[in-house]
Every structure is written in structure tokens, then in C-alpha cells.
Amino acid sequence: MQSQGMSAQSDRLGRMPSLGSLAKISVGLILIAIVSSAFVYAETSTVVVNGISYDVDYTGTGVTVSSITADTDFVSLIIEVDVTGSPGTLDITLDRNFFDSVYQGEDDDFIVLVDGDEPEYSETNTSDQSRTLSISLPFGTEEIEIIGSQFGSSEDTPVEEEEVTQPEEEVTPPVEEEEVTQPEEEVTIPTPIEKPVDEKPKTECGPGTILKDGVCILDERCGPGTVLEDGECVVEPVTESEVAPQGLGKQLVIGVVAGFIIAGIVGLVLAIMSKASKSSK
């Protein structure tokens, strides 16, 4: 009995793998895990924008894509991922009819954010139909956001605005203003007032006489030495013939007096001279 038990136990131990075999199996499993994690695979995800479905092709290396959604408010794609490689790589192809980034009719760069940071990425392929981006993802990345400028090809083509026909405004002809004729004011020319002209008699009389019946007669209305002028008696003017004798007499008196003075002075001088001559003898 004891010998049979020992032989059965020895058979079991002989069937168990050796330590070397277990080490080889462990190494093989590790290699398989590494290879499987680095395995490159291509897949397609469907994204709906404004009721239209679009297929997005992508290739992941060490990356598993959970979902792709469109954010029409920010014109961006949100990609949920699980990165097991270090680093992982995601190559995504964007159809221009679905999602694009243009500025003034020319291609513009996409903005790529990985968990809020800017990763290393490049545009590996560009054609008239699509654009392919290759994005490097660090281990543990959870979200990728790709920001463009438009969704759908309809935004590439400018929408023609319908011409709105404005109703024509009725043009009212201008009302002609009637010319108002102002009544002409009558200009009254004042009649010049004729001043009476005193007609002087053709025959003039001398001072102290008046004209009477065409004959100059002595004016007896004023006293002697006065004459009537402008209705008043004034002193009769003295003529030059009357003034000359009076002036001549005054000049004569002055000359006589001057002669006496000069003669007196001369006599006085002669007397002084004769007295002086006598005293000298």
C-alpha cells in the first residue's frame, strides 16, 4: 500500500512543469501582452452632425478609442481614448465634407488639445477630399479635442441671399408753390416846398436913403449918423476918406513931439561937450 502511494505521488510530480518551463511561459505571456498592446489597428467611427452621419477613419497604436462626438458650438471633435502605450499614436482622417479648418479660402491649421495641453502632432496627408492628422499621446491620456472652422461642406459654399424686392415708394411730385404777388407800394414823392424869394429892387440906394416910387430919398426914420439895416437903425459906417485926416493929424503930433525930444537930447549933448572943453583949458 505504501509503495503504491509513493508511486502515485511520483507520477504527479513528474507531470508538473519544471521551474524553467514556468519561466519560459511567463516571458511568453509578457511578450504577448506587449505585442498586443502595440498592435496597430484601423477602425471607423460614426459621427452625427446636424442630423447627418459621417464616417471617421482612424488608426491607433497603443490607443483605444471609446467614442467620437461633435461639438457644434465650438466647431470641434471630442475623442475619448484609453492610451496603454507610452507614447501612443492616433492617426485620424478627416473628410473635408465633414470637418475642416479653412481661413479666407485657404487651409488653416487645426488646434489639437490633449487633456487641455497642446501635444506634438503633424498633418501627414492632405488632399482635396481629406486631411490626415498624426497625434502623439502620452500614457494615460483620456480626451483629445480637435478644433476646426466648419462642419459640413455646405458651409464652404456661400449661401446666396434671396433678393428682397422692396416695394417702390410712390414719388409724390413736388407741389409748385404759387407765387404770391405782393401789392406794390405806392411811392409818394413829396412836393418840394418853394421858398419865397425876396425880390430885391433893381435900383439900390446908398446908406441913409431909401427907394420910394423908384427914386432914392433921404431916410428919415433913423437919427443923424445912423442908417436903417434889416429893420434896425445902426451907426453909419465911416468911409476911408473920413478916417484919413484923423490918422494924419495923429501922426503929425507924434512927429512933432519926437522932433522936440531929439532936439533936446542933441542940445544936452552939445552942452556937456562944451563944458568939458572949458574945463580942460
Image (spheres, rainbow, N blue to C red):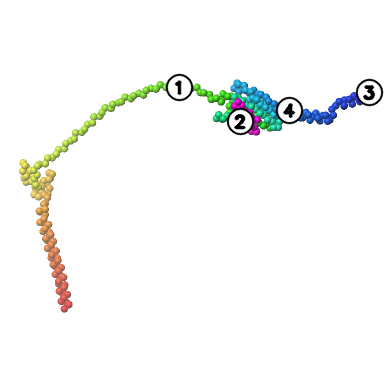
Residue furthest to the bottom: 281
Callout 4: helix, strand or loop?
helix
Residue 198 or residue 164, whichever sits in front: 164
User: Closer to the observer: label 2 or label 3?
Assistant: 2
Give the amino acid at mark 2: Phe
User: Closer to the observer: label 3 or label 4?
Assistant: 4
Q: How far is the residue under mark 3 from the one under mark 4?
A: 52 Å
**Label 2 close to label 1 by CB (< 8 Å):** no
**In the displayed structure, does residue 179 sit left or right of residue 93?**
left
**Where residue 152 sits in the image (x, y, percent)?**
59, 24
The region drawn magenta spans 110-134
**Label 2 close to label 3 by CB (< 8 Å):** no
Callout 1: helix, strand or loop?
loop
Per the image, the residue denoted by label 1 is 166
Per the image, the residue denoted by label 2 is 110
Give the amino acid at mark 4: Ser
Give the amino acid at mark 3: Met
**In the displayed structure, does residue 202 sit left or right of residue 87?**
left
Q: How far is the residue under mark 4 from the one under mark 2?
A: 31 Å
Give the amino acid at mark 1: Gln
Of labels 2 and 1, earlier in sequence is 2
**Where residue 173 sits in the image (x, y, percent)?**
37, 23
